[in-house]
């Protein structure tokens, strides 16, 4: 399975083409919309989220509710486009264009893609950079992730994402009986955190940052359960699944670090407190006493849940802007102020879930090389049986 996305933040629409989804998967717009709605929620977002009502159109690859095996095209409209039709016009504008349309963005925001992107592509109007570097693109990635999640669900692979930290406020309560319980508790939280005490403090921190014209970041975690042993491979560096997941996490706008299991804590601990002891019983086969490595050894899944975390830096656009330079005059100026979120960590936890789902779905499809969903379900079941009886 592979995919591309296209579309500018304030253009007419976002588009994705996904190739390699097996035939005969039940797929509806509802399966995708539910994920788009989850991404739009989340305390700390700016006014744009009140304008958008993200809903998908499936325009190819599905007939009567089932995938055909042919490329699937997904489209999500930008409702905000109607306010930007001249600014974002594809055809050259007539000469009597308004001042607003002519106004170029020439004061790059520190932390955003503006200056490096302008130098790279030779754009003197940095709108040409921000339109595509914007995390608006994560909308359509979440739509692709929803397709991946639908595939995984059929294979009894369960995935959940949640917020573990915002602005240094950490969820103390980390235990949950089942992934479904974690999901339920997280879904009801405005910051997608299931520790209610931390949730309150996180919301206060977001309010404080917003009132101060500042922004904050945090840490999200994604857990995948029901995964077969041996996805990915140690035999060549570009086949390691943990490295693909790490790349996918870092590709989310503003993500700066990633860790598995105990992650960076491992540097402080001896091997005896890091490696997961192997046990065996007749019912389940091989198991681990712990899952401190987050489900990976040698770039392969161990059969234990995948546990991956990513850190998101604070949003770069500040209502109290940092110093910058106007690229036309070279004079020092404060950076441009665009409408902005003050914290997008809760939304980003939904994006993280999507990108991990995509990598896991890609990996099972690559490993089991199938054309149809019934074959995939059977191969995944066989893989579990093989590992258990090994
Ligand atoms: C869901 C989400 C929403 C975001 N919202 C904003 C925003 O409103 N304003 C902003 O400046 N950056 C926002 N960002 C972050 C920027 O898109 C990101 O910092 C920028 O593309 C530069 O890329 P980098 O931070 O990965 O280097 C958001 C990121 C995500 C994941
Ligand atoms: C549009 C989304 O996020 C946007 C991501 C973003 C950025 O710079 O990354 C900037 C803001 O865009 P705007 O300037 O239009 O308000 C966010 O709203 C979205 O998540 O759907």
Image (tube, grey):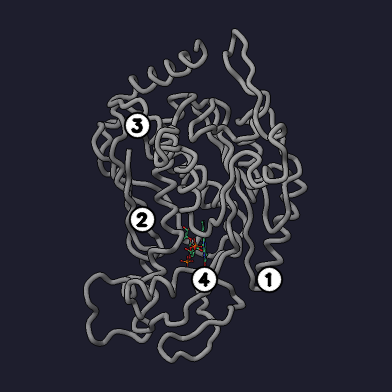
Residue, x 32% and y 49% (percent of image)?
4
Query: As drawn, which residue projects farthest toward the top?
Result: 282
Q: CA distance from mark 3 to mark 1?
A: 48 Å
Residue 229 percent coordinates (x, y): 49, 24
Q: Which residue is mark 3?
A: 366
- Whether the residues at callouts 3 and 1 have beta carbons within 8 Å, the answer is no
Which residue corresponds to mark 1?
211
In front of the other: 389 or 43: 389
Residue 339 circle label: 4
Q: Quick one: SS at disc 3?
A: helix
Left or right of residue 35: residue 119: left
Q: Position of residue 233 (x, y in %)?
A: 43, 32
Mark 2 CB in 8 Å range of ligand 2? no
Cβ at disc 4 under 8 Å from ligand 2: yes
Is residue 2 shown left or right of residue 160?
left
Identify the residue shown where x is 46% and y is 86%. Answer: 326
């Amino acid at each position: 399975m592979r995919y591309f996305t296209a579309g500018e933040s304030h253009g007419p629409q976002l588009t994705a083409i996904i190739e390699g989804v097996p035939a005969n998967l039940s797929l509806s717009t509802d399966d995708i919309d539910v994920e788009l709605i989850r991404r739009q929620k989340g305390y700390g977002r700016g006014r744009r989220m009140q304008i958008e009502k993200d809903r998908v159109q499936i325009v190819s690859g599905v007939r009567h509710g089932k995938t055909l095996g042919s490329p699937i095209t997904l489209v999500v409209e930008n409702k905000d486009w109607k306010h930007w039709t001249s600014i974002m016009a594809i055809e050259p504008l007539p000469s009597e264009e308004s001042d607003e349309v002519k106004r170029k963005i020439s004061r790059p925001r520190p932390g955003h893609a503006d200056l490096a992107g302008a130098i790279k592509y030779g754009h003197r109007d940095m709108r040409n950079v921000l339109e595509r570097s914007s995390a608006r693109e994560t909308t359509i990635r979440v739509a692709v992730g929803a397709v991946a999640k639908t595939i995984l669900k059929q294979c009894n692979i369960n995935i959940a994402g949640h917020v573990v930290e915002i602005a240094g406020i950490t969820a103390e309560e980390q235990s949950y009986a089942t992934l479904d319980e974690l999901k339920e508790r997280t879904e009801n939280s405005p910051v997608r955190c299931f520790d209610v005490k931390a949730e309150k403090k996180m919301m206060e921190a977001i309010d404080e940052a917003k009132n101060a014209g500042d922004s904050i970041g945090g840490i999200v975690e994604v857990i995948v359960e029901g995964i077969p042993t041996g996805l990915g491979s140690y035999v060549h560096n570009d086949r390691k699944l943990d490295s693909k997941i790490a790349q996918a996490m870092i590709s989310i706008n503003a993500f700066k670090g990633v860790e598995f299991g105990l992650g960076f804590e491992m540097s402080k601990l001896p091997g005896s407190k890091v490696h997961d002891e192997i046990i065996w019983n007749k019912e389940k086969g091989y198991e681990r006493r712990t899952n401190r490595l987050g489900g990976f050894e040698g770039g392969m899944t161990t059969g234990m849940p995948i546990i991956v975390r990513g850190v998101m830096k604070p949003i770069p656009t500040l209502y109290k802007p940092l110093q910058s330079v106007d690229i036309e005059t070279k004079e020092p100026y404060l950076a441009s102020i665009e409408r902005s979120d003050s914290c997008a960590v809760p939304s980003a936890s939904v994006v993280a879930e999507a990108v991990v789902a995509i990598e896991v779905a890609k990996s099972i499809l690559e490993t089991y090389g199938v054309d149809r969903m019934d074959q995939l379900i059977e191969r995944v079941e066989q893989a579990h049986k093989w590992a258990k009886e090994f």
